[in-house]
Amino acid sequence: MAKPDRKPPKKSERFLRGKGPTPKAEDRPYHKKYRSKEDSARKRTERKRIDSKRGPKGDKKFVQRRDFRRNEREHIDTVAGRNAVLEALRAGIPAKELILAVGVDVDERLNESIRLAQKMAIGIKEVERRAIENMTGIANHQGMALVVKPFQYSSQKEIFARAKDPALFIAVDGVTDPRNIGAIARSAAAFSADGLLIPERRNASLTAAAWKSSAGAAARLPIAQITNLARSVEDAKSYGCFIVGLDGDADTSVETMEIADQPLYLIVGSEGKGLSRLIREKCDLLVSIPMSSAVESLNASVAVSIALYAVDRKRAIK
């Protein structure tokens, strides 16, 4: 059977005939999704390049350039800079290594630092300047750093057992600046306090900066790191201490404190917030330091120094 002849399309039908399905947006060069697809392709290529530099099988970390100045986990407890290192060595800070940059310029500070390190049997090592920057997190280290040993804390039990009569203990509540901790230790040692107690949380520890601020006093003063300040306060009460808190709003001034000759557990808070509510409530007495109304508060270490001086004068008189 013969097929019927097909008639040629009319002119109007030819104009209506489609050109196929519309391309996807990401396939049209003039569309913004096309550019996004190109960017994604470049990122996949870059990812494959990074994947090729992975470590052993199973290591999921990409090899990336890290800025050690912003990555505190890479930092070691150090003192950096020529003056700072020299002062730390003079103060007798327990240290593990004196680090010098390869090709560092020699001056009197460097020579004296090397002599002191040799005298204290501290190892001396030369490294690249970038290694010191990675270690300290400080770019302007002047080619010298001192790696400090972890501080050897006493226990609260030991401090209480060795206290003289009348006892004098210092505790901190929320002091987060290690330089303040070091200065408090220095004042406590100067006025023959029996020990310094530092809670583990929300307080600075005995870092290199604290050692430096203490000017070596941290080696002469028993210092304990305690887990809970409130519990330590209760222990001090059982020991027979009066709990005295430094509070700028207290009505009693440190000069008129009548229990200065009794066993004392003196607590100082942070410069901004002061004592925490719980610790303030546990104090037997809150005392303030008279000062000009133009000054809102004193630095924690300065407040401790003034309070210790007042206690020492009263005890000397009695």
Image (tube, helix red, strand yellow):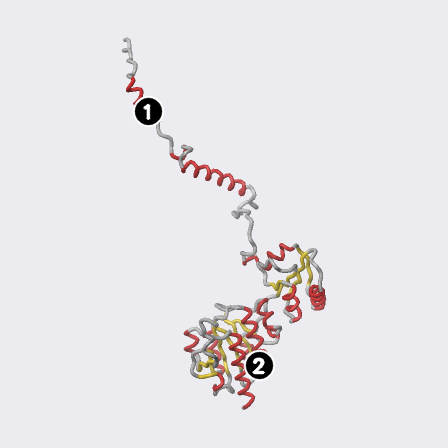
Give the amino acid type for the residue marked by disc 2 in the picture: Phe
**166 on left or right of 15:** right
- Please name whichever residue, 239 or 67, is drawn nearer the observer in this view of the structure: 67
Residue 231 in sight? no
Which quadrant is the C terminus positioned in? bottom right
Residue 59 position (above or below residue 121): above
Instruction: Point out the frontmost of discs 1 and 2.
Output: 1
> At label 1, which amino acid type do we have?
Gly
Q: Quadrant of the N terminus?
A: top left
Left or right, residue 290 beside residue 9 = right
**Tag 2 secondary structure:** loop
Whole-percent x, y for residue 75 in the image? 57, 59
Q: Position of residue 46 (x, y in %)?
A: 52, 41
* Residue 170 percent coordinates (x, y): 52, 77
Using the image, determine if residue 124 lies above or below residue 237: above
Q: Give me the residue at 59% from left, 59% from top.
A: 138
Mark 1 surroundings: few (<14), some (14-19) or many (≥20) residues within 10 A: few
Residue 100 has which mark? Answer: none
Residue furthest toward the bottom?
318
Residues 156 and 91: in front is 91
Asked if residue 242 can be seen in this view, the reply is yes
Displayed quadrant of residue 216:
bottom right
Q: Is residue 60 above or below residue 159?
A: above
Q: Which residue is mark 1?
A: 18
Foreground of the two, 267 or 224: 267
Position in image of residue 30 (x %, y %):
41, 34
Q: Earlier in the sequence, mark 1 or mark 2?
A: 1
Give the SS element for disc 1. loop
Q: Provide the residue designation for mark 2.
A: 191
